[in-house]
């Protein structure tokens, strides 16, 4: 580390609970390099990639509203939800120099950092190089928590029955999780998959690259009418990434005994509402009368299924049955811009930051 320049992204100011984040909420700064001598159990990591996720918006408020994520403190290093790093030095018995690792839940937005793995703050998971090949960022998309969220969400909450002619609707379908959820729904025997997104370009990618049967641009089209046209037999599964008005429209067209997979609510992350946000009396009545399940899904509750899930995702990926797209910001300095762009729908597929090689 001698002579190596270190840098990090710090949190400067809160946007306010009812405001969109801006680039000036973040600041790039040089910072001290890590010490040369490691204590027992410490690992020195060089960050290669950072994951940029909508749920991070909750950490910009004084209270995240959830128990499993802590709010960011002003003037301190940003802690993201995931990253990929390379072990440079290790005094931990489970890690050696050159190990490739996924940093989960509290990944410092920092070029070099020290940690004591799995001490309650930073969770490290070794990455099998045979799975990711020369594309380690796959561990942040298809072969990481994002892929597991899509896969286990569909498997655990979808109640898909082969041969039952079920239609799946996915909101935020051109994002990291939604794009995988639609493909997985098809692989798990949904008869039709419909994606909701916010541009004609994304609609084209959904149908031509990811194989969705239909794509609806909610910014230009009448969503209710288009759902009637594309889902003539009703909607049996709804993978909900956005919440709000769009989800109300979808739920109104859902069939009896259908299922909402409540994954995210990006449409309300900039508002002062609890998670998941309350539903109107009308939507609550529809859920009750039609026996529609709408249970919150949190992938962290299914860690016993991570290994089998990753293996299945890796199999589909190697067989060409799953396709991944990334939107890549180059350099740690671009972190704030990448986050703001993602929150405004500027990404197709997984938004990541390439920090170093």
Image: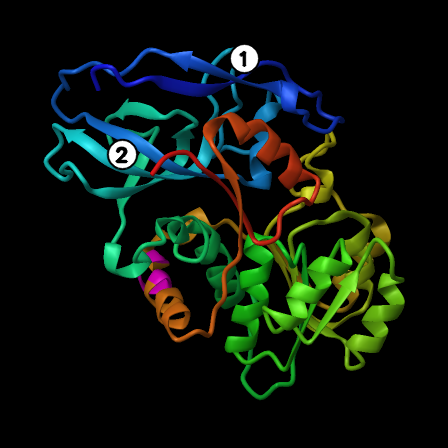
Mark 1 lies on residue: 74
Q: Main secondary structure of the magenta part?
A: helix
Q: Residues within 10 Å of mark 1 (few under 14, many from 20)?
A: some
Which mark's residue is nearer the viewer, 2 or 1?
1
Q: In what element is the residue under mark 2?
A: loop
- The magenta segment is 306-310
Q: Which mark is residue 118?
A: 2
Above-or-below relation of 164 to 293? below
Relative to 319, 43 lies left or right: left
What residue is shown at x 36% (from left), y 65% (from top)?
A: 314
Residue 351: % across, % down: 54, 45
Q: Image quadrant for the N terminus?
A: top left
Q: Residue at x 72, y 29 (%)?
A: 20
**Helix, strand or loop for disc 1:** loop
Calculate the distance from the C-alpha at mark 2 to the C-alpha at mark 1: 25 Å
Picture coordinates of residue 341, whole percent (x, y): 65, 37
Ranked by sequence position, the earlier of labels 2 and 1 is: 1
Q: Residues within 10 Å of mark 2 (few under 14, many from 20)?
A: few
Give percent across and percent down for residue 223: 85, 62
Question: Is 168 part of what is drawn in magenta?
Answer: no
Q: Quadrant of residue 197?
A: bottom right
Q: Based on the displayed image, in which of its 4 quarters is residue 114 positioned?
A: top left
Q: Residue at x 40, y 65 (%)?
A: 313
Q: Is residue 327 above or below residue 304?
A: above
Q: Is residue 65 at all visible to an observer of this figure?
A: no
Q: Report x, y in % for residue 137.
A: 40, 49
**Direction from residue 43 to residue 347 in the image, left or right:** right
In this rendering, the answer to whether 194 lies above or below 100 is: below
Q: Residue at x 87, y 61 (%)?
A: 221
Q: Nearer the viewer, residue 40 or 293?
A: 40
């Amino acid at each position: 580390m001698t002579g190596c320049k270190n840098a990090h992204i710090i949190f400067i100011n809160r946007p306010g609970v009812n405001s969109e984040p801006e680039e000036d909420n973040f600041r790039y700064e040089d910072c001290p390099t890590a010490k040369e001598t490691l204590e027992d159990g410490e690992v020195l990591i060089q960050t290669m990639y950072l994951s940029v996720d909508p749920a991070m918006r909750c950490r910009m408020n004084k209270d995240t509203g959830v128990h499993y994520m802590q709010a960011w403190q002003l003037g301190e290093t940003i802690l993201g939800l995931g990253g990929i790093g390379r072990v440079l030095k290790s005094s931990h018995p489970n890690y050696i120099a050159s190990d490739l690792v996924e940093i989960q839940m509290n990944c410092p937005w920092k070029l070099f950092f020290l940690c004591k793995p799995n001490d309650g703050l930073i969770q490290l998971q070794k990455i099998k190089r045979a799975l990711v090949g020369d594309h380690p960022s796959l561990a942040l998309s298809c072969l990481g928590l994002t892929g597991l969220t899509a896969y286990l969400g569909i498997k655990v909450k979808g109640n898909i029955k082969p041969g039952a002619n079920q239609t799946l609707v996915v909101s935020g379908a051109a994002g990291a999780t939604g794009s995988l959820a639609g493909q997985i729904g098809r692989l798990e025997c949904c008869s039709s998959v419909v994606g909701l997104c916010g541009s004609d370009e994304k609609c084209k990618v959904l149908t031509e690259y990811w194989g969705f049967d239909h794509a609806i641009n909610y910014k230009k089209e009448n969503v209710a009418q288009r759902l009637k046209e594309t889902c003539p037999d009703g909607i049996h599964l709804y993978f909900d990434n956005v919440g709000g008005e769009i989800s109300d429209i979808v739920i109104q067209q859902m069939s009896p005994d259908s299922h909402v997979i409540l994954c995210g609510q990006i449409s309300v992350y900039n508002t002062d509402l609890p998670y998941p946000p309350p539903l109107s009396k009308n939507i609550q009545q529809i859920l009750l009368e039609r026996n529609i399940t709408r249970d919150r899904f949190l992938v962290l509750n299914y860690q016993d299924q991570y290994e089998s899930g990753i293996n299945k995702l890796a199999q589909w990926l190697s067989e060409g049955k799953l396709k991944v797209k990334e939107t890549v910001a180059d350099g740690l300095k671009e972190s704030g811009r990448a986050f703001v762009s993602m929150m405004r729908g500027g990404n197709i597929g997984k938004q990541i930051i390439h920090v170093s090689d």
